[in-house]
Amino acid sequence: MRLRAAAAVLGLAFTVTMAPVRADVAPLALAVSGPSEQGGWLRGQAPAGTSALMLDDKPVPLAPDGGFFVAFDRDAPPAAKLVAVLADGRRIETALAIAPRAWRIERIDTPKRPGGLPDAEFAQRRAGEVARIAAARARDSMAQGWRQDFLRPAPGRLSGLFGAQRIYRGEPGAYHSGMDIAGGAGTPFVAPADGTVVLAADAPFTLEGHLLILDHGMGLNSAFLHASSLAVKEGDTVRQGQVLGRIGMSGRATGPHLHWSVTWQGRRLDPLLFLPK
Ligand SMILES: [Zn+2]
């Protein structure tokens, strides 16, 4: 052990690698748990002394206690590599298998773009809205919701699932980016986990209506669409279970419902995979 310690101080990674394996020294590993599938995520704990963490060579935020969160896009490839770099230069590589999923086709009886607005006006309004959404998602508060088991934000039938390919009156659109809960107009919806309000649209957005975005920390956030009213404002810190607003049909919606979407560092995730089975 004395040789290993000396090598570690000098940053001689190769010496450590070549050290004889001893039964009483457990191999360093990244502890991860969670649904490892497309649209899913993993929460984990890096060993003491981890100085950096990377998912497929991209840096991943690391909490001061070594906790971390990584997630997989709806179209993620079947394998990913998680690498922890220790302060002494050693690298711990963990191969992750990401289970593929089959996505549904959904036909929606509503135009792809909201009616009533000329193209130029829609494009102009939309650019400002998209910029606000991007700025909100780029904010990282110190919220700790990413560590929590999430709550269902509202009761009601699930009327739309994440990932379904949507066709608007014959015109193909993007896949469904969230989960729809038909909770009924006026039903309060709550924070699924602790967070900071990074966007609260008092004036409805063209598509999202009264949009609310909650940062859960570490690049993870929730968005809630189509509210009839919001009960919180930008900058508010909210607790898991706190009322955020009421379900409505503002923006592009065929009826009152809560659209809940979850993203992590630009990747779209399946909200259902955050809830207890
Ligand atoms: Zn939706």
Image (cartoon, grey):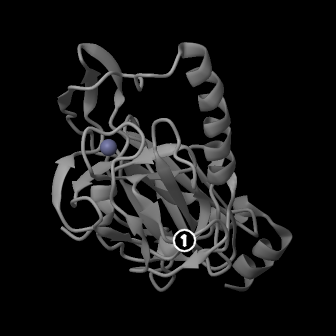
For label 1, the SS is loop
Q: Residue at x 71, y 59 (%)?
A: 14
> Badge 1 local density, few (<14 within 10 Å), some, or many (20+)?
some
Residue bearing the label numbered 1: 232
Image quadrant occupied by the C terminus: bottom left
Residue 33 lies in quadrant = bottom left
Q: Nearer the viewer, residue 55 or 248?
A: 248
Between 211 and 70, the residue placed more toward the observer is 211
Foreground residue, 224 or 252? 252
Question: Is 8 rendered above or below residue 41?
Answer: below
| Ligand number 1: quarter of image | top left
Give the residue furthest to the front.
116
Asked if 190 appears above or below 18 in the picture, the reply is: below
Q: Quadrant of the N terminus?
A: bottom right
> Residue shown at 44%/81% (left/top)?
23
Q: Looking at the image, can residue 218 be seen? A: no
| Residue situated in front as seen by the camera: 273 or 3 | 273
Q: Amino acid at mark 1?
A: Val
* Residue 209 image point, x, y percent: 46, 45
Which residue is located at x 27 percent, y 28 percent?
A: 165
